[in-house]
Image (tube, rainbow, N blue to C red):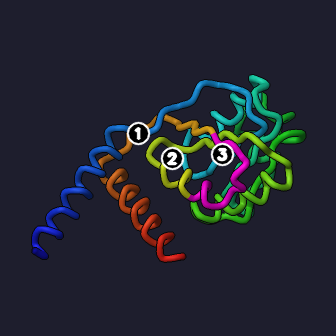
Amino acid sequence: MIRRIFSFIILAWMLGFVWFALLLPQPAAIAQTDAVVVLTGGPNRIDRGLDILKAGKSRKMLISGVDRDVKPAELAAQYPGSARYFTCCIDLGFQSVDTRSNALETARWATRNKVKTLRLVTHDWHMRRARFELDRSLPSDIIVTNDAVATQPSLNALFKEYNKYWLRAVASLAGI
């Protein structure tokens, strides 16, 4: 009996991994939202957020997880033609160090800025866990759109992220 239960758990985990790896979230169409939140940690994420601002589809953007040593002018210099957005529309979040604290930082920022619709920008392989954490932290009246930046993740990266996702889900059930 124990062997069957263990086999069932392993089979469910393997099928879940196949689902996770083959059906990665996709980029969203550029549509109107109150704000954009970009989680740092990889290429093209900030570019995607800036594209949304430049298209006039959001009024504000939070870049969450910025290193404390980064200055807005230095960051703006890395994205030609974006300096005006860094002065009017972009806030840098220096409080987070991981996905969970990204979500907490975003929730505080969204509440402070009276955001009702939010676009979440992160890599496709990271989207599910980021959204899980964000849903746990945000007020329930904020509507979130997933906007995944497409990547070509390695099998190892997918394996790690899948396990982090499920470990976080189990930890949340335990109240952690």
Q: Residues within 10 Å of mark 1 (few under 14, many from 20)?
A: some
Stretch of the chain drawn in magenta: 133-144
Q: Position of residue 168 (x, y in %)?
A: 46, 66
Q: Which mark is residue 127?
A: 2
Asked which secondary structure carries label 2, the reply is: helix
Residue at 86 percent across and 34 percent down: it is: 84
Earlier in the chain: of badge 2 and badge 1, it is 1
Residue at 74 percent across and 61 percent down: it is: 94
Amino acid type indicated by mark 3:
Val
Residue 176 lies within the magenta run: no
| Front position in the image: 176 or 27 | 176
Q: Residues within 10 Å of mark 2 (few under 14, many from 20)?
A: many
| Front position in the image: 78 or 31 | 31
Asked which secondary structure carries label 3, the reply is: strand
Amino acid type indicated by mark 2:
Met
Q: Is residue 71 above or below residue 60?
A: below
User: Looking at the rendering, which quadrant does residue 53 occupy?
Assistant: top right
Q: CA distance from mark 3 to mark 1?
A: 18 Å
Q: CA distance from mark 2 to mark 1?
A: 8 Å
Q: Which residue is mark 3?
A: 38
Q: Is residue 148 above or below residue 164?
A: above
Q: Work out which residue is located at the far front of the displayed protein and give it.
A: 1
Asked which secondary structure carries label 1, the reply is: loop
Q: Are marks 2 and 1 in contact (CB under 8 Å)?
A: yes
Q: Position of residue 140 (x, y in %)?
A: 69, 53
Q: Which residue is mark 1?
A: 24
Amino acid type indicated by mark 1:
Leu
